[in-house]
Amino acid sequence: MSMRINHNVLALTAQRNLWVTQNSMDTSIQRLSSGMRINYAWDDPTGLGISERFRAQLSGMVEAERNANYNVNLLATAEGALSVIDEKLIRMRAIAIQASNGALTSTDRMVANVEFQQLKSEVTRIAQVTNYNGLNLIDGSYSGTSASGTCLALGYNNASTTNDNGIKFHIGQNNTVGEDYYYVNLGSMTSSALGIDSSDVCTTASAQAAIDSIDEAINSKDIERTFIGSMVERLQNTILNLQISQETATASESTIRDTDMAEEMMNFTRAQILMQTGISMMSQANMLPSTVAGVLG
């Protein structure tokens, strides 16, 4: 075995291995303390890029779910107002049937008409004041431009991919029309829009005409409530789908980015042992040049 004192190669080797072990221990401590396998870009550049895209998707999904819940609340506000309008229309129909009876006097019908007109005014008032976050919902502000009397006008086109004066529902993580957002039209529920603005029960003839007008108004209101109910059901399915997508995306992001605590603890223990033996070997390597003195002496 050759003996040299100018260059202690064994000590340099031990020092290099200690440096590698120290880096491994530092990495394990960072991962164990943070719970993240990727703390810096150089830990896994490719994994970092993939996980960041998952994070962006997850953030979009969370906000889309919130949006969908906001939209459910908005529609619930409109539906609640329509349920009250429903009560008014039913009462107006009952008054019209009562006033159609020939046993009532003109004075009786005039008295009945007072309540009838007040109920009609209340229908319009409710339609005008119903709002969610400052948006007037059923006064015609977002009714669209469907042709009156067509099947499309009865609510079947009220969720559209075109901005036909509707409320935009953005319920997706991206920005694709029809998939991530669409526009919702809500019909006007004022007495004028329902076709009962000129109705009265002052005579038997006008009372009979009012019955027919109110029946049509009830049909229009029922179609609008059916549409709102179907939209809420649709949004609830959207929320469920978003929650499932969040779970799978979170699992994928976690697989890439999170620390496997058991595996990392094993690596840390290994690094500790190597550090202890490395320091011991460094001490031994540093003592080797002193043996030269025995040869020279």
Image: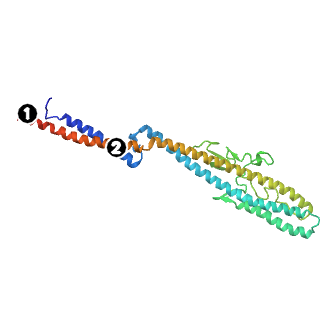
Which of the two discs, 2 and 1, labels the residue nearer the N terminus? 2
Image coloring type: rainbow
Residue 22 coordinates in the image, percent (x, y): 29, 42
Q: CA distance from mark 2 to mark 1?
A: 42 Å
* Depth check, front residue: 236 or 285: 285
Residue 59 appearing in the image: yes
In the picture shown, does residue 219 fall above or below 257?
Answer: below
Q: Quadrant of residue 270?
A: top left
What residue is drawn where x is 44% and y is 39%? 47
Residue of label 1: 295
Task: Provide the secondary structure element on which disc 1 rests.
Answer: helix
Quarter of the picture holding the C terminus: top left
Residue 152 coordinates in the image, percent (x, y): 76, 45
Q: From the viewer's perspective, is 85 left or right of 269?
A: right
Q: From the viewer's perspective, is 193 left or right of 18?
A: right
**Callout 1, which amino acid?**
Val
What residue is drawn where x is 13% and y is 36%? 289
Task: Provide the secondary structure element on which disc 2 rests.
Answer: helix
Residue of label 2: 268
Residue 175 coordinates in the image, percent (x, y): 59, 43
